[in-house]
Amino acid sequence: MTIFGLSMAFKVTAGLLFTFLGIGVLVNVLLMVVAVKILSERQENRGLEEERVTG
């Protein structure tokens, strides 16, 4: 009975770890995508501003 209890506890613990670590990885990937898009848009805006200033 204790082996089953430990096994069940391990299954629940492992499931929770995979769930929350997986969510953390997904959130970090999404944040990186957003950061890259923001940086590329800023760079594009700087180029457009330089063209406007230099004519």
Image (cartoon, rainbow, N blue to C red):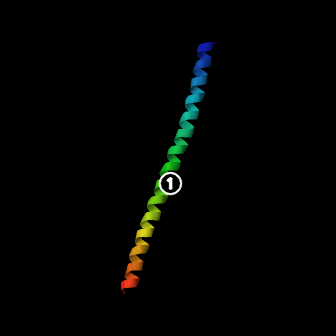
In the picture, the quarter occupied by the N terminus is top right
**Of all residues shown, which one is farthest toward the bottom?**
55
- Please give the name of the residue rendered at 51% of the width and 47% of the height, measured from the top-left corner: 26
Residue 3 spot, x, y in % from top left = 58, 14
- Height in image: 24 above or below 9? below
Residue 51 sits in quarter: bottom left
The residue indicated by pointer 1 is 31
Residue 7 spot, x, y in % from top left = 57, 20
Three-letter amino acid code at disc 1? Leu
Q: Which sits in the foreground, 5 or 40?
A: 40
Residue 31 spot, x, y in % from top left = 50, 54
Q: What element carries label 1?
A: helix
- Please give the name of the residue rendered at 46% of the width and 56% of the height, measured from the top-left corner: 33
- Height in image: 53 above or below 15? below
- Please give the name of the residue rendered at 55% of the width and 30% of the height, measured from the top-left corner: 14
Horizontal relation, residue 44 to residue 16: left or right: left
